[in-house]
Amino acid sequence: QVQLVESGGGLVQPGGSLRLSCAASGLSFRWYGMSWYRQAPGKERDLVAAITSAGGSSNYADSVKGRFTISRDNSKNTVYLQMDSLKPEDTAVYYCNAVWGPRTYWGQGTQVTVSS
């Protein structure tokens, strides 16, 4: 049974930082490309950042470039999203996603709220 479990969300003031983690189990983690998506109320789920299976390449949404960093530790079956200089518009539920060919899995999401 594949599980992706996100953690690290919470309430933070504008300009603050959070580090999200996504722990994977039940799959061969090192084979999967990993991504973070987010969904704000009333909006579609959008890609935030993605990283290749070996971690050699990553890409980001324009709105988070220079502020967010995606990384992974294949020895721990975990992918991270370091979020700095957070803005109120970053408020959303953040989801972890794993993809390998036709196989795709989602976590349950973690809430990030940026507010003073």
Image (cartoon, rainbow, N blue to C red):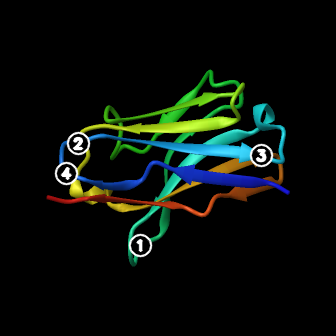
**Label 3 sits on what residue type?**
Ser
Name above or below for residue 40 compared with residue 114: below
Q: In the figure, residue 104 lies in which quadrant?
A: bottom right
User: Mark 3 falls on what kind of element?
Assistant: strand
Q: In the figure, residue 39 lies in which quadrant?
A: bottom left
Circles 4 and 1: CB atoms closer than 8 Å: no
Circles 4 and 2: CB atoms closer than 8 Å: yes
Q: CA distance from mark 4 to mark 1?
A: 22 Å
User: Mark 2 falls on what kind of element?
Assistant: loop
Give the residue displayed 70% in from the left and 24% down from the top: 54
User: Which quadrant, please, contains the C terminus?
Assistant: bottom left
User: Mark 4 falls on what kind of element?
Assistant: loop
Question: From the viewer's perspective, is the residue at label 3 or at label 1 nearer?
Answer: 3
Judge the density around disc 4: few (<14), some (14-19), many (≥20) Cα neighbours within 10 Å: some
Give the residue displayed 23% in from the left and 42% down from the top: 16
Q: Which residue is mark 1?
A: 43
Q: Which residue is mark 4?
A: 13
Q: CA distance from mark 3 to mark 4?
A: 32 Å
Q: CA distance from mark 2 to mark 3?
A: 30 Å
Name above or below for residue 111 compared with residue 102: below
In the picture provided, is 109 more to the left or to the right than 28? left
Judge the density around disc 1: few (<14), some (14-19), many (≥20) Cα neighbours within 10 Å: few
Judge the density around disc 3: few (<14), some (14-19), many (≥20) Cα neighbours within 10 Å: some
Q: Which mark is residue 16?
A: 2
